[in-house]
Amino acid sequence: FTGKPVDGYLVNRIVGTRALCAALGRAQERAESDGFGQLLWDGYRRNAPWIASSAGRTT
């Protein structure tokens, strides 16, 4: 939507609420007890629209 990658897109970080993080932690523990793990492929990046608009682009 911006014509080029948005700053922060390649950062290995996802924004989530404390409740979400706690739930993911519990799910991770349960998955590990069964021999599995978690991999989050994508998530909410709350700054992306702000970065795009501050650079004179629209979302």
Image (cartoon, rainbow, N blue to C red):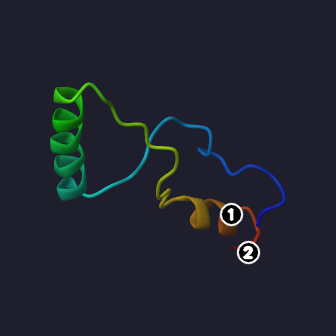
Real-space CA distance between mark 2 and mark 1, rounded to the nearest whole angstrom: 6 Å
At label 1, which amino acid type do we have? Ala
Residue 1 shown left or right of residue 52 in the figure: right
Which residue occupies the extreme bottom position in the image? Answer: 58
The quarter of the image holding the N terminus is bottom right
Instruction: Residue 30: name its quadrant.
Output: top left
Tag 2 near tag 1, CB within 8 Å: yes
Which type of secondary structure does the marked residue at label 1 adopt?
helix
At label 2, which amino acid type do we have? Thr
The residue pinned by badge 1 equals 52
Q: Residues within 10 Å of mark 2 (few under 14, many from 20)?
A: few
The quarter of the image holding the C terminus is bottom right
Which type of secondary structure does the marked residue at label 2 adopt?
loop
Look at 24% across and 46% down and name the residue there.
Answer: 24
Q: Nearer the viewer, residue 59 or 53?
A: 59
Q: Position of residue 35 (x, y in %)?
A: 26, 25
Residue 54 shown left or right of residue 35 in the figure: right
Residue 23 shown left or right of residue 12 in the figure: left
**Relative height, residue 44 to residue 1 (above, below):** above
The residue pinned by badge 2 equals 58
